[in-house]
Image: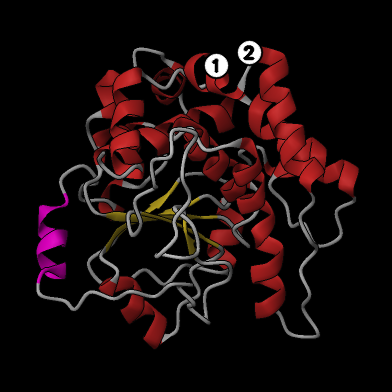
Amino acid sequence: MNSRQNHFLFARNARIYRRSALGLIGLGLVPPLAFTTIVSSRGQRAEHEGLPTVQVPLLHLPSIHNFRDVAGVDAQSPYRNVHGVALRTRTLYRSGWISADDADAQRLRTLGVDVVYDLRPQEQRDSQPDRVPQGAEYVPLFQMGASASAMQGRQAAAPESMEERMRFFVSDQGIRTRTVFLLEQMALVEGAQVFHCVLGCDLTGWVTALLHTIAELPQDVIMQDYLLSNERLKSEANAEAQPAPVQASYLQAALHEATARHGSVQQFINEGLRLGEAAQQRLRGKLLMQT
């Protein structure tokens, strides 16, 4: 990455790229020809118009690991924040690798997905490319070597290693920069969006915890949602490929690191990520039902 890209990557006057898809190209995160626009998704939304809507309480997409709604797995009983306000369903989704078969690719399109954010490092994207639904934009956020040692597979990782990995999501400047960019883009895109890593439980779990913090979910609900990956992955796994379970201590490690550095997770969002109040308000508007 050259000096100009580094300037864009770490400059805190990020309004230059926050409101434009050109920011992704300037950051070196997305090749120019692979990206037409994120912020303006009118053409994409037009493709979704007229498609039948679906109500899938558990959003079971058999070919995609750990796919679920950030608002909760039951569309009839979404999570509620500390003020009793319900989260809005069918807006933000989290998952593992988008290995969709034909049926699930169509389900993603029917759900109105406009953007897919891939949080995996480049080598994993190359070996297991996403299958993005027709009409959706694909946005890879991590380059080869971007915190590579902390982004490797988790199958044989010891709990201490996983806890350190989760703390790294807080302490590493590169990951923080890409995390705030992801949150800013989520705030700007009007259609439904999916973000994912390999199994949808580590970096995806951390980003979800940040979104839930912005929405003011109770701490026990944030942890409950994080640990739900165990139930989802276990039900999807075969006997030869049992994923390593997540533990509460993993998310706690990241939460404690953020609190130790900034006093609270919300202050980490404000100061560590420097996510502006306008972006946070837009995210709350997406995440929460109107009262």
* Highlighted range, magenta: 41-49
Q: In front here: 35 or 116?
A: 116
Mark 1 element type = helix
Q: Residue at x 77, y 46 (%)?
A: 248
Q: Which residue is mark 1?
A: 267
x, y percent for residue 45: 14, 60
Using a 10 Å C-alpha cutoff, classify the residue at mark 1 as few (fewer than 14 neighbours), some (14 to 19) or many (20 or more).
some
For this view, does 118 lie left or right of residue 27?
A: right
Instruction: Using the image, determine if residue 190 lies above or below residue 245.
Output: above
Q: In front here: 270 or 273?
A: 270
Q: In front here: 79 or 106?
A: 79
Res 185 quadrant in image: top left
x, y percent for residue 209: 57, 40
Give yes or no for residue 42 being in the magenta stretch.
yes
Q: Which mark is residue 262?
A: 2
Name the main secondary structure of what is drawn in magenta.
helix
Mark 2 element type = helix
Instruction: Give the Cα distance between marks 1 and 2.
Output: 6 Å
x, y percent for residue 40: 15, 45
Q: Residue at x 44, y 60 (%)?
A: 77
Q: Are marks 1 and 2 in contact (CB under 8 Å)?
A: yes
Most distant residue in the front direction: 84
Q: Quadrant of the C terminus?
A: top left
Using a 10 Å C-alpha cutoff, classify the residue at mark 2 as few (fewer than 14 neighbours), some (14 to 19) or many (20 or more).
some
Q: Amino acid at mark 2?
A: His
Instruction: Using the image, determine if residue 35 lies above or below residue 25.
Output: below
Q: Amino acid at mark 1?
A: Gln
The disc, 1 or 2, on the residue closer to the chain's N-terminal end is 2
Instruction: Using the image, determine if residue 36 lies above or below residue 181.
Output: below
